[in-house]
Image (spheres, helix red, strand yellow):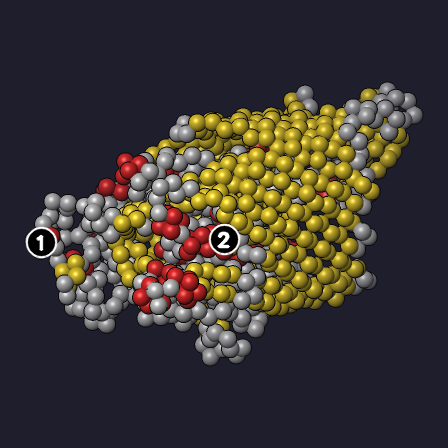
């Protein structure tokens, strides 16, 4: 017989794709996009109605009646799974890999952070985002990593679609040196509903960059609500003092989010956000008087929308615009140096590196259902434009005629991705399985554009631009030292540096998940990709989950992965001033396709290859207590690194050193992630304890220097920078309490020790009794383990108004103080805990 009806939520909203299953035959179907169903069943059979996030019902239906079925929201339900599985029936606790779900609204009540990177830094232990200082472009876009792997080894998605990377490539002493990452901070927190983090290799599912995992940012979809929130805060500018005698880093953020209904079951949601954060200044050295964090002014506009156009079809669109203006101080220029002009700066100067960064994206697609197949057609376009302007500077070869600010040019990355995906869940009497197939075509375009001539040129005594033909006698000098050209702090990109390159990529994938029984499932994925510039790659993934009991799941996975070299790594080139120790030298970063690279036996860049293995379990030991523990092993072959500086004085380029990008090292990373949650509900209150932690160990297994000097190619100092990007551990313990309208949260974050090698490693052995061991010992900077404390209070005055106050790093804890040979030029390097000390804030939220 045939039964008909509609399935609604408790708010009378039709539930599309709700599941119906005949309890006897086990045959099933799903509701249409308007929530209706038409189902052929046997007589006197019961039907199970279920929908993720709602309580199931078992009902007996009769024919010739239109049934209205209402499913209520569950109280302690699993998170709906979007990331890591294309099976719409899968929930987070049933996945074969580790996935974190961060509800932004719930988590924001115990966080002071105004940017995504720092927000995730304190929420997910295996996620590390380090605020840089004295690292040129990296001061403006923070590099972030998962499990200590590279910033470009984590794929970022928006609503399940690939997000473009930044055009910036990290140089010098930054974390992620030689890598390009995605600028997560270009996405306003106010536009985000939740963040999903897949902590497992996923190249076979999602393509390049997913070696470490995948971050999926789900945008807000509220359709009848206005939210306004503002944050005001500042830093304690007095290191190691509880009571400040001065403040800096004043931060203000104002955000507005509004959602409205469109047609039937459609919506559009807008977010606009403005943020201003001033410089922080911390104790520096004579080499860098203005050590501290960059100032940022940020304006964003984002939207998210879905519009049904047919019973089983809807179109969707999302995207945004972000404009960022930043200011960061470079190293100090000594007054009596060939890099200064006394007539302009009698006391020397601190160059100011500023940037205008534009980040735009637009994703448009259509989802349709055809004969129970879900079809998703999409096109996503993204652009990141990074433009340098150098201020409070000069070109020393122009002497007293030099301007004091320059347009230094910049770089741009455009990425366009077109995809079509098919998926269907098949239900049989004994088991069910999901099949997903897809095609993806991507076009990347990378560009370096030149600045004004004086930002990069060196001029001789006759006012002409110096070339390889200029006699040395015509060079301008000061106290016998040749004056360097270009803007001090950051030299501009020249016409010779200009690049305009593109490449295409075609990907084909298939994945499946088979539920053999209610206890046991296996997933498999296979992906082939072809790149126009280096060829093809084939990767696979196998994963499984077994329910040992209703409360205990065992899960594991094995996969191969890859990351294609970025266009920036292949084509980036620049002549710049590099501080080796406290001595400025002129260096030339050679593009990988340059013949000079081949003369140094540097091969054409190829993809990084990975092997991932994970084993873990989830346990719901009671209605109050949940636990997940996951171990992992990641082997990466041919990791791309930025080499050290090779002597170039004999090449005739007017530079002291050259360096290259190369597939330089192999690494192995092992670790364990732990998440424990306990929560107890009372009549008007609750109490919860959360412990999460990551223990991580990275080992460099091979350095591929060939016949080149190993210490120059990737020496002890460079090795330690790479290893420090994978700190030994990070743990967070928080106590959360609510009584009536008041919420409070007390959190402790433990940062592990870190060891770095400072610039003394390059000083003459004569300074260390001709002992290499003494020099190495003097060069080691040990950062001891530290614990920071965060305290937050939130009061809900009524349904519309919430007020929050608190402090991050309440007791003003700083990293271990070092000497004057750090890479940053200050008394600390860039470490995971940061160097800004306490941050005190107030936050006001208004919902209408």
* 490 on left or right of 311: left
Real-space CA distance between mark 1 and mark 2, rounded to the nearest whole angstrom:
46 Å
Residue 59 is tagged as none
Mark 1: secondary structure? helix
Question: Sequence-wise, which precedes: disc 1 or disc 2?
Answer: 1
**Looking at the rendering, in which quadrant would you find the N terminus?**
top right
Q: Residue at x 22, y 54 (%)?
A: 486
Residue neighbourhood size for the residue with mark 2, other residues' Cα within 10 Å, grouped as few (<14), some (14–19), many (≥20): many
Q: Residue at x 92, y 25 (%)?
A: 44
Q: Most extreme residue toward the front, as rendered?
A: 770
Residue 474 is tagged as 1
Across and down, in percent, residue 724 comes to 50, 56
The residue wearing badge 2 is 723
Mark 2: secondary structure? helix
Across and down, in percent, residue 317 comes to 53, 37
Across and down, in percent, residue 812 comes to 53, 72
Can the viewer see residue 312 in this picture? no
Q: Nearer the viewer, residue 24 or 589?
A: 589
């Amino acid at each position: 017989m045939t039964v008909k009806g509609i399935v609604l939520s408790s708010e009378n909203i039709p539930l599309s794709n709700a599941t119906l299953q005949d309890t006897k035959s086990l045959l099933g179907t799903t509701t249409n996009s308007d929530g209706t169903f038409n189902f052929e069943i046997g007589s006197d059979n019961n039907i199970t109605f279920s929908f993720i996030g709602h309580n199931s019902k078992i009902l007996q239906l009769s024919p010739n009646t239109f049934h209205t079925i209402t499913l209520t929201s569950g109280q302690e339900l699993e998170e709906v799974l979007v990331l890591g599985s294309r099976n719409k029936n899968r929930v987070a606790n049933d996945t074969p890999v580790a996935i974190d779900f961060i509800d932004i609204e719930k988590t924001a009540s115990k966080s002071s952070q105004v940017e995504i990177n720092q927000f995730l830094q304190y929420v997910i232990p295996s996620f590390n985002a380090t605020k840089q200082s004295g690292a040129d472009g990296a001061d403006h876009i923070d590099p972030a990593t998962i499990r200590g792997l590279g910033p470009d080894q984590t794929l970022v998605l928006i609503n399940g679609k690939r997000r473009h990377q930044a055009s910036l490539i990290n140089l010098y002493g930054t974390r992620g040196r030689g890598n390009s990452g995605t600028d997560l901070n270009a996405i306003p927190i106010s536009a985000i509903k939740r963040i999903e983090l897949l902590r497992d290799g996923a190249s076979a599912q999602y393509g390049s960059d997913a070696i470490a995992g995948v971050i999926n940012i789900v945008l807000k979809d509220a359709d009848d609500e206005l939210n306004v929130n503002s944050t005001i805060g500042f830093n304690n500018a007095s290191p190691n003092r509880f009571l400040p005698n001065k403040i800096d880093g004043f931060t203000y953020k104002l955000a507005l989010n509004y959602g409205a209904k469109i047609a039937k079951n459609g919506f559009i949601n807008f977010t606009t956000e403005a943020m201003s954060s001033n410089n922080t200044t911390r104790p520096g050295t004579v080499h860098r008087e203005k050590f501290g964090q960059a100032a940022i002014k940020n304006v964003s506009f984002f939207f998210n929308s879905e519009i049904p156009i047919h019973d089983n079809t809807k179109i969707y669109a999302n995207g945004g615009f972000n404009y960022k203006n930043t200011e960061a101080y470079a190293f100090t220029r000594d007054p009596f140096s060939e890099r200064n002009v006394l007539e302009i700066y009698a006391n020397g100067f601190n160059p100011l590196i500023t940037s205008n960064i534009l980040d735009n994206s637009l994703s448009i697609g259509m989802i349709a259902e055809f004969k129970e197949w879900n079809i998703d057609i999409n096109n996503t376009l993204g652009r990141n434009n990074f433009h340098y302007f150098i201020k409070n500077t000069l070109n020393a070869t122009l002497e007293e005629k030099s301007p004091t600010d320059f347009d230094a040019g910049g770089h741009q990355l455009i990425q366009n991705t077109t995809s079509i995906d098919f998926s269907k869940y098949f239900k049989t009497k004994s088991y069910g399985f999901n099949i997903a197939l897809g095609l993806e075509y991507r076009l990347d375009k990378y560009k370096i554009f030149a600045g004004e001539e004086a930002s990069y040129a060196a001029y001789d005594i006759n006012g002409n631009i110096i070339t390889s033909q200029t006699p040395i006698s015509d060079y301008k000098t000061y106290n016998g030292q040749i004056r360097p050209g270009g803007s001090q702090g950051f030299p501009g990109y020249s016409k010779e540096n200009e690049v305009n390159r593109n490449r295409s990529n075609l990907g084909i994938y298939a994945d499946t998940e088979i539920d053999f029984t209610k206890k046991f499932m296996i997933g498999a994925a296979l992906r082939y990709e072809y790149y126009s510039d280096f060829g093809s790659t084939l990767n696979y993934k196998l994963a499984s989950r077994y329910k040992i009991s209703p409360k205990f799941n065992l899960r594991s996975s094995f996969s191969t992965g890859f990351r294609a070299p970025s266009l920036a790594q292949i084509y980036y080139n620049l002549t710049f001033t590099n501080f080796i120790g406290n001595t400025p030298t002129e260096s030339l970063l050679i593009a990988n396709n340059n013949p000079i690279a081949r003369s140094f036996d540097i091969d054409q860049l190829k993809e990084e290859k990975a092997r991932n293995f994970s084993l873990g379990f989830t346990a719901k030991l009671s209605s109050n207590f949940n636990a997940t523990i996951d171990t992992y092993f990641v082997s990466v072959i041919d990791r791309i690194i930025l080499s050290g500086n090779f002597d170039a004085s004999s090449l005739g380029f007017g530079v002291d050193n050259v360096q290259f990008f190369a597939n330089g090292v192999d690494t192995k990373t092992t670790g364990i992630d732990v998440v424990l949650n306990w929560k107890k509900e009372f009549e008007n209150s609750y109490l919860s304890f959360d412990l999460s932690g990551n223990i991580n160990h990275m080992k460099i297994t091979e350095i591929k220097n060939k016949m080149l000097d190993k210490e120059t190619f990737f020496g002890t100092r460079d090795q330690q920078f790479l290893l420090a990007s994978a700190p030994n551990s990070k743990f967070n313990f928080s106590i959360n309490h609510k009584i009536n309208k008041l919420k409070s949260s007390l959190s402790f974050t433990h940062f592990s020790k870190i060891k770095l090698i400072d610039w003394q490693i390059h000083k003459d052995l004569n300074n260390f009794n001709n002992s290499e061991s003494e020099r190495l010992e003097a060069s080691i900077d040990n950062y001891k383990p530290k614990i920071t404390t965060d305290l937050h209070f939130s009061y809900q005055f009524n349904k519309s108004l919430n007020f929050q106050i608190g402090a991050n790093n309440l007791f003003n804890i700083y990293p271990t103080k070092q000497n004057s040979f750090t890479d940053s030029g200050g008394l600390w390097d860039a470490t995971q805990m940061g160097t800004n000390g306490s941050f005190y804030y107030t936050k006001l939220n208004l919902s209408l």
